[in-house]
Amino acid sequence: MDTPFSDRIADVPQSFIREILKVAMDPTVISFAGGLPNRDLFPIEGIKQATNKVLDEHGADALQYSNTEGYPELRQYISDRYRDKQGIDVPIKNILITNGSQQGLDLLGKTLLNEGDDVVIEEPGYLGAIQAFSVYRARFNPVPVSEEGLNIERLKGVMLSRKPKILYTVPNFQNPSGISYSEQNRLDVAEVLEGTSTFLVQDDPYGDLRFAGTEKASFKKLIPDNTVVLGSFSKTVVPSFRLGWIVAPDALMEKLVIAKQAADLHTNYFSQRIIHQFLADNDIDAHIKEITDVYGRQRAAMMNAIDEHFPKEVAITHPEGGMFLWGALPEGYSSMDLFDLAIKEKVAFVPGQPFYVSRQEVNTFRLNFSSVDEETIETGMARLGKVIKTLLSA
Amino acid sequence: MDTPFSDRIADVPQSFIREILKVAMDPTVISFAGGLPNRDLFPIEGIKQATNKVLDEHGADALQYSNTEGYPELRQYISDRYRDKQGIDVPIKNILITNGSQQGLDLLGKTLLNEGDDVVIEEPGYLGAIQAFSVYRARFNPVPVSEEGLNIERLKGVMLSRKPKILYTVPNFQNPSGISYSEQNRLDVAEVLEGTSTFLVQDDPYGDLRFAGTEKASFKKLIPDNTVVLGSFSKTVVPSFRLGWIVAPDALMEKLVIAKQAADLHTNYFSQRIIHQFLADNDIDAHIKEITDVYGRQRAAMMNAIDEHFPKEVAITHPEGGMFLWGALPEGYSSMDLFDLAIKEKVAFVPGQPFYVSRQEVNTFRLNFSSVDEETIETGMARLGKVIKTLLSA
């Protein structure tokens, strides 16, 4: 039959990354293309103990339907942690548990965006946000990020000429670039946004994964009325639970809960109970330190290999946390061409193109260091360095 | 700040049922208002064994990110079961795992509906579907259901005057009414739909919960090209996992996967692995028989109590499975008035109003029998009968 699809679904960019990950699944390929946490660090035994405890003590409760907002004790844990770690007061009524922070993006699109509404997005920016907001037919206004943070002049320009509903940011160890906004940049961004009706979305899946430098202020502290924070347990505990949350002001939260109920009633409650039990019974900060120690070493191995194997014309970012760094070939070279050569040499990464809403041919590329061990990083980066030299000398 | 919400979110009916459930949470109230499976039947021990096995044998795999479509072995299990139980061939490429079947509704709205597109919905119809499609600003065309099934003349009328994208049905033990479409009614509905570009959505969360009568043909067998089936483990295994699935033809499935990825990347993979292990290691048909034996007895207790305590002017449906039955006061009486009286007598149900898209004041009401034991059913129905007599004699 002739299928009459909605207009919106035609607008969503296909995840080119999915195709790349398929190519990179060849076991002889060393892949820096993924975005996976290091599976060797998953707390399998702790999850097992938490699960057995939940089933032994609260079995029927933990297996029944639950409420849309999420398990109150888990939301209380999140609230307490914001208070203890960042000095931010977030009552649990302002916390909604979601299926990963990706669902937070979908719910924000649903509750805020009419067709053609303006969204400001970082360039390069997170592909999942581009996809989520494309579903609601947003008009994207890219603002460049550099190692300082958002380009303030460009942001001011967009805020003058448009009335964006959303400014989407990943200020800590951004995906794809690894960049963090400086303290001054955060103050400048906050000043531009304050008093407007634009929501600043601080997507913060990596915020806890700092292995260098010092913590910067959350936008929730700087401009609380305008700020929505997305959090996640995927990078600090386990990804497969798909447990994230959204922090939003009262009026928006009321709409988000309606949208969440219509979307899937509530998030997997069994996993909410397990993760709460796990967090209650374990020292999560010690666990996070274990993760950041490993990622810090892997990032160092990658930077060292870049020093050794990459031509000096290749620029890179210097992440203080998270899972990614970002490279740039000299102007005029295509990272897609580099990808084609690299696959032949059995090494993979993600070309920059899917992270831009306004450009097709780019010289940038993303490297993931969290899911590859140090020795393999050295081998893979040597291969990649060789391929880059071939490309640049062609 | 002045929050600029989307137009769509204003259209979603608030879940009036949530408010009712809050009132009904008073422990002195006997509630037939819920829609919960009987928690005494949850296979806690089986889930525990399956979880430990998954964590012991595949811990890191089961805790990592996974693919959008869902765990292939779980989809294979679902495919095998369609073949074995219903003689239907559903390749796994046509099965997408969702966060309960509610998410299937959201993804269908997303991929199919432009603002103002026509959707045919049963009257009374499932509130969750009304909510999900309201988000995409559907125009609802209600078609009445009776104990035979959909009103064919009304369906033909709508199909002539509109080009609906979706006909939404719950042909087995409908929520809210408990009605099942007869074999002849299914053939008639299929004949009306065949050759059109309308998708018939067969939402089938209760299909396995038959305690009387004989199984009827799936629309997937009658008009496979037009049929989308939504399935769920919530009623046969456990609800808190939020595990459902959607069966769709190739072209639609391709769009559903794009929408699913943008919505939340993938469904909780840990729970997919556990439920697959549970299904592999246990006799699910024996477990379902245990459930239907209990629900069958609870339904009989409710029907007996109705015979004894309700005035004869109250009409009721005669469900052969599922979790609900449906009552109708004589014309002119309001089930909302009845609710107000009933709460004072410490008994609750859901007034029919939220299940209609075109009527505000209705004489119908929903009774749930799955989550209340036989003795309590007798006590509660005696209270309700007394309240009905008071209302009718006022």
Image (cartoon, coloured by chain):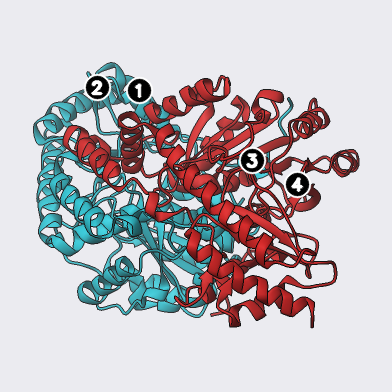
Chain colours: A red, B cyan
Nearest-to-viewer mark from 3 and 1: 3
Q: Residues within 10 Å of mark 1 (few under 14, many from 20)?
A: some
Name the residue nearer the viewer: B172 or A268.
A268
The location of residue A303, given as percent across then percent down, is 63, 56
Q: Quadrant of the N terminus of chain B?
A: top right
**Distance (Cα) linking label 3 and label 1:** 44 Å
Which residue is identified by label 1? B23
Residue type, numbered disc 2: Val
**Distance (Cα) linking label 4 and label 2:** 48 Å
User: Do the residues under discs 2 and 1 have CB atoms within 8 angstroms?
Assistant: yes
Which chain does the residue under circle 2 lie in?
B
Which residue is identified by label 3? A172
Which residue is identified by label 4? A119
The location of residue B105, given as percent across then percent down, is 47, 55
Q: Residues within 10 Å of mark 3 (few under 14, many from 20)?
A: many
Q: In the rendered image, which quarter is residue B345 located in?
A: top left
Q: Residues within 10 Å of mark 2 (few under 14, many from 20)?
A: some
Residue under the image location 13 percent in, 46 percent down? B45
Q: Report the side of B4 relative to B65 (left or right).
A: right
Residue under the image location 63 percent in, 45 percent down? A173
Which residue is identified by label 2? B29
